[in-house]
Image (cartoon, rainbow, N blue to C red):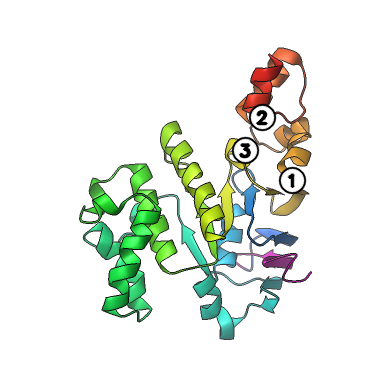
Amino acid sequence: MTQEEGMIIFNHVSFKYNSDEPLALNDVSFRIPKGKWTSIVGHNGSGKSTIAKLMIGIEKPFEGQIYLNDVCINDENLNELRRHIGIVFQNPENQFVGSTVEFDVAFALENNGVSYEDMQAIVPNALMDVDMLDRATYEPQSLSGGQKQRVAIAGVLALNTDIIVLDEATSMLDPEGRKELLSLIHRLKEEKDVTIISITHDLSEAVGADHLIVLNKGSLYQTGSPQAIFSQGDALTEIGLDLPFAMRMNKQLLGVTDYISYEGLVDKL
């Protein structure tokens, strides 16, 4: 695959945490297309978190290779990888180190040797991008869950990364907070031309993705468009995934398991 076909490529990657344990990932190959929203979904224990750790260089493959822009990642260029990828975790409080929102966004910039004068421009712009500039002087602990995630995203944007990884980033939010955060990410993808990788067990979140990767028990189950994969609804439930609400209602009310959006279900009813 070329750079145009895949910004990140996993090539026959296997991984185990300890030598006497079974493989957490077994011969997994897939590509992350550049400038798109890719959702990686699977049940608990399917290997999603392991892929996130490998993707940002926390762990190394037991076998196989990981490529970023056609370059195989190794110990020598690991820092280069981390300049391209930023991650937002499930609990953003684990990422906060600053006493205020603006100090927290500035922290990673300072670690990267950015001058104070440049930070004065970068931090407000990043907070403005996520609609949090009016809370720049707030303590992070005083924010709502959705606001904390926005600050974590601002910290990634400040570093000007090409790729944003969301590792179960919406799982602790209420429905309204989840909707607002996903809307923000979609907007940033278009405005900033970044590649979004959403790692989630929630298929409802994956409906709006451009590309879908499904894992099952450490192996690649399927990859393709959400429409193509969701059309096989019964197969997804067999591997422990819950179908999006519209598809569940479509099956219960009309006996059909084909892919359908919420708007499509309303029109059909």
Residue nearer the viewer, 267 or 205: 267
Rendered image: mark on residue 173? none
Amino acid type assigned to the residue bearing label 1 in the image = Ser
Name which residue lies at 74% across and 14% down.
254
Marks 3 and 1 in Cβ contact (< 8 Å): no
Q: Secondary structure at mark 2?
A: loop
What residue is shown with label 2? 261
What residue is shown with label 3? 203
Left or right side of 73 for 105: left
Q: What percent of the width, then of the height, locates residue 248?
A: 66, 23
Mark 3 vs mark 1, CA separation in Å: 13 Å
What residue is shown with label 1? 225
Q: Is residue 216 visible?
A: no
> The magenta stretch spans which residues?
1-18
Left or right side of 85 for 126: left
Q: Nearer the viewer, mark 3 or mark 1?
A: 1
